[in-house]
Amino acid sequence: MRRSDFHFDLPDELIAQRPLSERGASRLLALDGPSGRRDDLGFRDLPSLLRPGDLLVFNDTRVIPARLFAHKASGGRVEVLIERVVDAHEALAHVRASKTPAAGSELRLADGERLRMVAREEGLFRLRALDATLPELMRRHGHMPLPPYIRRADDAADSERYQTVYAEREGAVAAPTAGLHFDAAMLERLTEAGIGTARVTLHVGAGTFQPVREEDLDRHRMHAEWLEVSEAAVARIEATRAAGGRIIAVGTTTVRSLETAAVAAAKAGAAMATASTPSATAAPAEDAHVAATSAADAAVSASAGAIARTGKIDPGRTSPVLAPYRGESRLFIRPPYAFQVVDAMITNFHLPGSTLLMLVSAFAGHAAIMAAYRHAVAQRYRFFSYGDAMFLTRQ
């Protein structure tokens, strides 16, 4: 498939610029992947779509106030968007200015505190905070990094509403927006209904908003994001599966986290098996572990495109479906793709031609998704981060 296969017309007025007064007041479009059936619901109807014993998996990342405004020595205005905090004093960031500041130059924040431009690294800039730690600077000067399609400055309300109620681990520069619909009352209703929960972490980067520029999707290079699928999360998922429950991902970031862990587990298992065959050169156990880890890293970066194209991880594998994973992922999920973990998902509506629209198309079917999006436009659903939600079952 090509990028143009994921285009749809969206009137500007359907792009939500502010959240609704209540988190749970949003609409919910339910789409059954196998049949293509659609139901127009409200988000408060979510429990009716779930079964006792199902497991909801949430992304517990917390958005940091990553947007900073500074000035060059010449007085020119500079906008900094932190992409990833490296340590207490250094970060990789996007820098916007009329003329890009040179390496070694300094940027000054409102009270004179300084950031030094250290070097350029693959489209980002390494910055060093000179007078305080980066977390301190962001607390004093940072703004919530609202997406580019929200055409207004952030305000005090965004500090709460552009954050899930269960956010815990700081590091994202964009919210996992499917989770914005959940409030404490909904979480309590789900618990009372016998719905289990688990958590993963994926620190959403600004790359999630970058358009796909290549018409040939094989040429697209996916942005990297850091994630962790813990041993506890894997145990909950395996127990749910064993009991016959469904794994329901809250958001595309959770889908990417779980599917990345599955890819890594399969590739690591294959590497361990190769290392242990009689014909293989004998190696210490720790060397075999290194080989497995390297294979896993490769699987979620360079190999991701091949996996997406074939729709298969390893049809002959005997390794576990899922294992704990901690590291980066460049997994690009698009049709066709054989999902290993997720049975259903909750997601917002996504940008035309985006990798997120490609992911949900792989999950529920391209034709069904594009028809559902046309229906959502006709029915005046609200789109993108502060917009309405979908509930999808896998095709």
Image (cartoon, grey):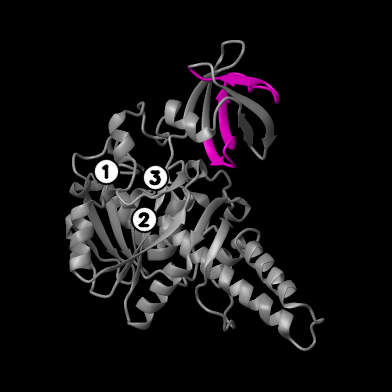
Mark 2 / mark 3, whichever is N-terminal: 3
> As displayed, is residue 7 above or below residue 107?
below
Q: Is residue 106 magenta?
A: yes
Q: In the rendered structure, which segment of residues is drawn in magenta? A: 82-110
Label 2 sits on residue: 370
Image mark for residue 306 = none
Q: Which residue position is annotated with label 1?
A: 382
Write the residue at 28% across / 39% down: 14
The amino acid beneath tag 1 is: Arg
Figure check: 149 above or below 301: above
Q: Is residue 303 left or right of residue 284?
A: left
- Dot 1 or dot 3: first in sequence order is 3
Q: Position of residue 154 (x, y in %)?
A: 35, 29
Read off the residue under disc 3.
175
Compute the Cα span from label 1 to label 3: 17 Å
Instruction: Identify the element where label 1 is drawn.
Output: loop
Q: Quadrant of residue 104?
A: top right
In front: 336, or 239?
239
Is residue 282 shown to the viewer in this render? Answer: yes
Question: Is 52 above or below relative to 355?
Answer: below
Residue type at mark 2: give it.
Met
Considering only order in the chain, which callout, 2 or 1, is on the residue closer to the N terminus?
A: 2
Q: Is residue 351 visible?
A: no
Residue lying at the far bottom in this picture: please name it. 278
Q: Is residue 297 magenta?
A: no
